[in-house]
Image (spheres, rainbow, N blue to C red):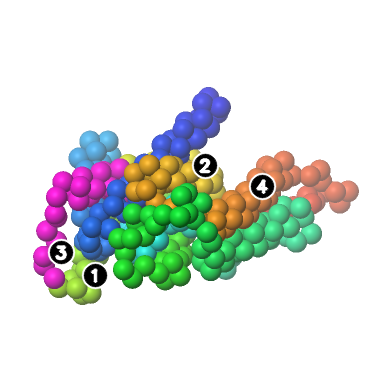
Amino acid sequence: MSCLQKWKTIFAMIIVEFGFAAVNALFKKVLNGGMDQLVASTYRLAVSAIFLAPLAWFFERKVASKLTARIICSLFISALLGGTFTQYFFLLGLEYTSTTFSCAFLNMVPVITFILALLLRQEKIKLKSRSGRAKILGILFCLGGALILTLYKGMALINPSAESEVESSHRKKSWFLGSIFLFAGCFVWSAWFLVQARISKDYPYQYSSTAIMSFFGAFQSAILSFIITRNVSKWILKGGLEILSVIFGGMVGSGLCYVVMSWCVKQKGAVFTSAFSPLIQIFAAVFDISILHAQIHLGSILGSILVIIGLYFLLWGKSKEAEIYKNPPATEKNGQSALPITASPTHI
């Protein structure tokens, strides 16, 4: 049963990453056509709330009484971080860069989450242990990869003599500015993981919590959109591709994918869940080349390799640390354990 449970979560996360890559490719196409980021985010979250509400009522209507004011406030903050700000910053960065490049930034989410957990004292590093040194090395690799992704674009690796369709469609394309937006999106999504880990303990009901989060996120995105721009014409969907994108993005990207991620966080922890983020980049590269006819640049490849190496150094250190806590060393002669009794591994 434990093996079956492990493979269920692995298979579920592979499907989630494929879904995210497909959603990103669709939204890249409609953003190139001039669709507003906040409008896209609002419609996407609204579709997610409408889609998940009947599922939450059918599967989890008996737990509605367990909603408290504190949980509702936590879900409002979760929507602001994981819905409104994450999607807004990520869609902005996606418009200025490419699908593959933007998905490469998602590889930094586990590391940023780890650093935030350190600052909040939810995570510790023991420099004298191999696991602690591995985590430090992983952070350094990821930071180096992030700098390469941000500052070095490099030569095009796919048909370098021709300008890509995506590049020619943007007049004010800025790789550096796009990187800043993507980093901001990764930062707020990392904060969402910490908030979601707490919510999954207090209110472990994925359908209703994601539906409520999507509702709050749609409301927040609409308010932010009317504050930034009051152009009503931007709210009119133009063509079947925009309609398909918001429906598919809402049902899959902001709906089912978040439900499955919340379930995996509850089952295996945030480190396990975020470890699959490099798959988004692989799937996105396929969509980028085959559908968007985008270029793959040397800087994206080099930076991604460093980020992925750093990610798995960090995960290796976390797994070794978890093994130590699961199988603590033998007690010393004075009868006290080498590890504090109150110590426990913290999932990030």
Residue beneath the point at 60% across and 64% down: 143
Q: What is the secondary structure assignment of the residue under circle 1?
A: helix
Residue at the spot of label 2: 268
Kindly report the distance in space between the C-alpha atoms of the residues bearing marks 4 and 2.
15 Å
Q: Is residue 107 left or right of residue 29?
A: right
Which range of residues does the magenta coloring cover?
Answer: 231-255
Residue beneath the point at 14% across and 50% down: 239
Q: Which of marks 1 and 2 is nearer the N terminus?
A: 1
Kindly report the distance in space between the C-alpha atoms of the residues bearing marks 4 and 3.
47 Å
Query: Which percent across, then down, holds residue 294?
Result: 39, 51
Indicate the amino acid at tag 4. Trp
Q: What is the secondary structure assignment of the residue under circle 4?
A: helix
Asked whether residue 95 is drawn in magenta, I would say: no
Reply above or below: 229 against 237: below
Q: Nearer the viewer, residue 37 or 302?
A: 302
Which of discs 3 and 1 lies nearer the camera? The answer is 3
Which of discs 1 and 2 lies nearer the camera? The answer is 1
Query: Which percent across, then down, holds residue 148?
Result: 57, 64
Quadrant where the C terminus is found in the figure: bottom right
Residue 36 appears in the figure: yes
Residue at the spot of label 1: 224
Residue at the spot of label 4: 316
Q: Which of marks 2 and 3 is nearer the N terminus?
A: 3
Q: What is the secondary structure assignment of the residue under circle 2?
A: helix
Indicate the amino acid at tag 2. Lys
